[in-house]
Structure formats: C-alpha cells, structure tokens
Image (cartoon, helix red, strand yellow):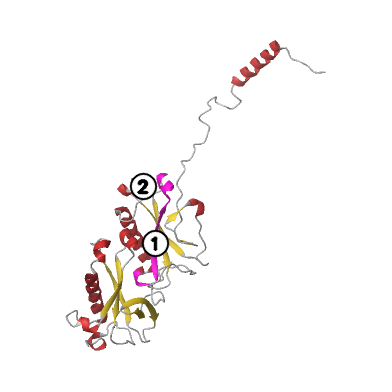
Amino acid sequence: MRRWLPALALAGVMTMLLLAGCAPARGADGDLTDDWPTLRVPKPFTPATDTCLPRVTTVVQASTYETVDCARNHLAETIHVGTFVGPDALTEARPEPGSSALRTARAECDQRARQVLGGDWHTARLALSLALPSAPAWTGGARWFRCDLSETGSIDNTRPVNRTGSLRGALIGDTPLTHRCFDPKLIGDNLNYMAPVLCTEPHRAEFVGVYEERDMSWAEFAKSAEQAHQRCMALIAEYAAVPNNSELPYRAGSIYYPPSQREWEEGDRGVRCFLWSDDRKLTRSMRGAGPEGLPAI
C-alpha cells in the first residue's frame, strides 16, 4: 500500500533537516573558504633542452612536440632554450626576422652552439636554427626561443640529414664535419656545386675561414660582391701565409657563401670564404703554404 506523508508533516521534516544542516560537522570550523588548496597558476608549455628531435621546425606547438633519444636517428638537437626579456618580451606579436629581439636571440644561440660544439658551427656541415612558440602560445604568455643544431649534407645542400649521436664536442679535434678541400663543378663561368674531396686529391678550392658583416642590411650586402671578395681575400692571405698585396689576385681567387636572407635578417652574418685556384689543380692544403706553395702566376 502506498503511503503518503501529509504536507504539513513533510514541511516539518524539511525544517529539521535544514536546521541540522546548519550545524557545523564535528571537527569543522564552519569556514568553507580556508580549507581548499590554492590552485596553481598554469604555466605555458616550454620545450626541453639537451634533447634530440625527429623533425626541424621554426614554430613549436605543445600538441605536436616530440623528442627522441639522441642515440636514434634524428634531424636536430636542441642545445639551448632561452627567454625573451625586457622590451622584447612585451610585444603583442611574436618577433619577426629583422627585429632586434630575434637578433638578440640568435646571438645567444650562436654563443651556446660554439660552447656545445667546441668551435664555430659555420666552419662545418652544420646549421643553426631558431624556433619560437606558436602565435596563440605567445599571446598566452610564452616567451621562450629554442636553439637547434642540425647536420647538413654539404656546403651547397643545407637541408638537415639524419644522424645518430649528440653533437656535443663535435668540432673538437679532427672531424669529418669540418669544411676542407673541394673540387668545384662549374656550368660555364658559374659555380654549380662544391664537391668535397681529400686535400691530397686534385682540387681547386679550400675553406679558409669566416668573417662577420655586422653593419650591412641584406640589400646592401647583395650589392657589395666586391667588398665580400676583398674580405675573403684577406682571409686567404692570412690562411696561406702570403702577402695581401697586388700579387695576391695572381695567387688565388675567392668563393664565398653568405647566410640566407632569412638567416641574415635573424642576425646570422657569418660569411664562409674559400680559396679558389682557377688556373691549376692543387694537391695539398694551402694552409701556411707561403709564396712558394701558392706562387703568383
């Protein structure tokens, strides 16, 4: 049989329940706001340093971020994660190529790369790239930049290649990554590509060093081929231990490789210089060769 509780009696029961609910539980202080743990402020995603990556990218998103063991095949190695500070961190949009913020970040990456490698990465089959947070992450407060090193196929092909093992200390001592001697392949009077060879094999070109062009825009540099040539010729004279005088053009010419426009605008101003022997094949390194080893003919 269904039982019904009179409305008046139900109201009395509800009153008793409500009154009972107002009494503090045993051991409670009656304050409902002081016993909850403080919620942590969420922090933007930041990539890890000293780790290796299966791909190279200029924008890093938390949803697709992935690392691999450096002992396995990988395309890049993160050597440093820095932070934009001061006015560079106050912009509404991510820094773009040409900005002082990216030039500052690139300089920090370059310094860190030299420390990790044990030498200047420009002197070897290596590339240094800069990665930034996504636009929404920047808006959300992310202010980091990532510095990645990659091994490349050649001086002409700067695309990253798969490698195993860390690049830490890779430029200490004798290393196959370092630029040495080349047998340039020409199409007419134009350089097609630089074929690397042993310096004891017949060749016409040799890497002599890097100079930095700090005071030029990319447009100005593109119009100053003669100045780049002269800067490289000075390095050639020093490298081969010959006088930098009017006879130098009769001893050797130059080949130079600047950074890409994007790299230049980010702050990389390292120009790679090569000794070029137009009229004869060389069968030894020209380092310290002197006037007799590199005669004016």
Tag 2 and tag 1, C-beta contact below 8 Å? no
Q: Residue furthest top?
A: 8
Query: Mark 2 belongs to which amino acid?
Result: Ala
Question: Split into 4 quadrants, where in the image is the C terminus?
Answer: bottom left
Which residue in the structure is indicated by mark 2? 93
Q: Earlier in the sequence, mark 2 or mark 1?
A: 2
- Residue 190 location (% of width, % of height): 32, 76
Q: Residue at x 40, y 45 (%)?
A: 139
Residue nearest the observer in this picture, 90 or 19: 90
Q: Residue at x 40, y 47 (%)?
A: 138
Query: Mark 1 belongs to which amino acid?
Result: Ser
Q: Which residue is drawn at 36% across and 47% down?
A: 93
- Residue 275 location (% of width, % of height): 29, 79
Say the numbered circle drawn on residue 129. Answer: 1
- Residue 43 location (% of width, % of height): 45, 45
Would residue 120 be seen by someone viewing this image from the given angle?
A: no
Q: What stretch is highlighted in magenta?
A: 122-139
Q: Which residue lies furthest to the left in this view?
A: 246
- Residue 155 location (% of width, % of height): 37, 73
Residue nearest the observer in this picture, 22 or 81: 81
The answer to if 136 sits in the magenta stretch is yes
- Label 2 vs label 1: CA separation? 20 Å
